[in-house]
Image: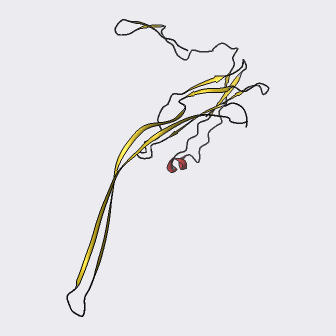
Amino acid sequence: MTIFSAIDADDDDPEVVKIVPDGFFWVHPTTQKETKKVVTSGKGGGGVLGAAEVGAELTRDKTVEREASNAGTVRGAMQTERRTFGTPNTATWTLMENTTDKTGAPVSMRAAILVKREHVNFQAHFTVVVTPDNKTLVKTWFKSNPKDEPVLYKVDKKPTNVLHRYDQETIDKEGKLYTLLAG
């Protein structure tokens, strides 16, 4: 979850306009064949004082086959947090594992957030919530996580570092010239 807010309490909070991925998506789908066999039987009969036993047996077999499909899910949503009014100021993504093969949630995901703001400084509070299985949960009882500081965005400052370096012109295998637009 990422919550955007103004640094100065007198300023308006930024608005989350669009997120990607947005909505509900299936990832890592699996299909599994399930077969269920039901057998019922009954036996009845009787004998009379030394006479041979007379009886009958009834057996019924029923086999049911079906395909069960399952997948992990990713759900992206824009919400309003820490207040009860106004435009969305939060982007959240929920990742759930495929419960059939239990391979865990997706190991990586790329996301984008488009934020609309006035010319005011703002901050983002990032929160990651993990709901582990019971074995992992027991291991984490004796650990503590320090609270993270928000990421500050000062709109009037120049960037302090370069996160990515791109060549402005690259040539593919066929010799064609391309221009990369880096943001």
Residue located at (51% from left, 48% from top):
133
Residue at point 79% right, 26% down? 10
- Total numbered labels placed on residues in the image: 0
- Residue found at the far left of this picture: 52
Instruction: Judge from the rendering whether residue 131 lies leftward or rightward of residue 36; answer left or right.
Output: right
Q: Position of residue 165 (x, y in %)?
A: 51, 13
Quadrant in the rendering for residue 176? top left
Q: Residue at x 25, y 88 (%)?
A: 47
- Image-quadrant location for residue 59: bottom left
Color scheme of the displayed model = secondary structure
Residue at image position (46%, 40%) is: 72
Work out which quarter of the rendered image holds the C terminus and state it.
Answer: top right
Q: Decide: is 97 above or below 60.
A: above
- Residue 99 is left or right of residue 161, and the answer is left
Quadrant housing the N terminus = top right
Counting from the top left corner in percent of width and height, residue 33 is at: 33, 49
